[in-house]
Amino acid sequence: MIKTVLLDGFTLYPADDSRWNAFGRFADITIYDRTAPDEIVDRCRDAEAILTNKVILNRATIAALPQLKYIGVLATGYNVVDIEAAAAAGITVTNIPAYSTMSVAQHTFALLLAATNRVESYAAANRNGEWVSSKDFTYRIGEWPELAGKQMGIIGFGNIGTAVAGIALAMGMTVAVYTRRPQSDLPAGCSKVDLEKLLQESDIVSLHCPLTPQTKGLIDSNALGKMKPTAILINTSRGPVVDESALAEALSTGTIAAAGLDVMCNEPPEAQNPLFSCPNCYITPHVAWASTEARERLLAIAANNLEAFATGAPVNTVC
């Protein structure tokens, strides 16, 4: 049995949830709902394996845990771990690849449809009696576009970007893609373009790129200024890809029409974030990954990752 500590299980399941029993046949696991930075070393002093979602394991923390042999990141992105420090210490690090592709793609369109079809606004208005007091059989809250025939521009074309493209094509949209992949590798109906052309011509710009030094702040005031005034920005990738102050200004001044965000630069965000005061900004709390099925897949893969390591044949390794 490998001695294991899970630092922040709550976003997946509470610590007392029976589904964590998936680890019981090969791991002696202690589960915490949340762990503060100054609690990590004390909680993990004797651990051979650590599981983390968003708790950061930096060089100093890794150095303070000489018993540690394995870090399992409960997400696809593994920037919460100092990979160089882990590799130098001979620690195996794994992640959870491609578990939430369709969930994030679905949420991308949930955000888009929130901005176009205004279901939330209609539902709230009708709870307040708008329809029952109407003189007509219907009424409209502003204009809304039909998505068929519109262009979706996708920045980043991995598993999720590809899935989003498939949905967009099925809805009758055209798809432009900014990616390193050659045109010959793209699905039928998708056109590779440069970033400027994508920004200038797309009716919807959807972000699906990783956070790197090159993509941090990619959507800034200059990029937003190239977009159509009727355009909608969707971000289900990473918050810092977007300059939030620039986006708030663009939404307030009509530079673009709307935005749908599932990620922000700080999570949880600060109360005074200017995007919260923009009525044309639709924000969800980083839940695109968290459908019932995706969380079940994540747990199953995480358990398999740790079991594979315990048996000497690690899989989904980062280092």
Image (cartoon, rainbow, N blue to C red):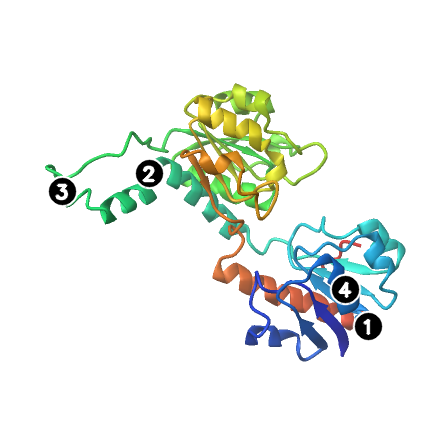
N-terminal label among 3 and 4? 3
Residue 275 versus residue 3: which sits nearer the camera?
A: 275
Q: Nearer the viewer, mark 3 or mark 2?
A: 3
Q: Position of residue 64 (x, y in %)?
A: 86, 61
Residue type pointed to by label 4: Pro
> Do residues under tags 1 and 3 come within 8 Å of each other at their CB atoms?
no
Residue 212 versus residue 308: which sits nearer the camera?
A: 212
Question: According to the image, label 1 marks what residue?
Answer: 46
For disc 4, the neighbor class at 10 Å (few under 14, some 14 to 19, many from 20) is some
Question: According to the image, label 3 marks what residue?
Answer: 133
N-terminal label among 4 and 2? 2
N-terminal label among 1 and 2? 1
Q: Nearer the viewer, mark 4 or mark 1?
A: 1
> Do residues under tags 1 and 2 come within 8 Å of each other at their CB atoms?
no
N-terminal label among 1 and 3? 1
Q: Nearer the viewer, mark 3 or mark 4?
A: 3
Residue type pointed to by label 2: Asn
For disc 2, the neighbor class at 10 Å (few under 14, some 14 to 19, many from 20) is some
> Do residues under tags 4 and 1 come within 8 Å of each other at their CB atoms?
no
Question: According to the image, label 4 marks what residue?
Answer: 314
Name the secondary structure under disc 1: loop
Q: Position of residue 50 (x, y in %)?
A: 74, 65
Q: Position of residue 208 (x, y in %)?
A: 58, 39
Residue type pointed to by label 1: Asp
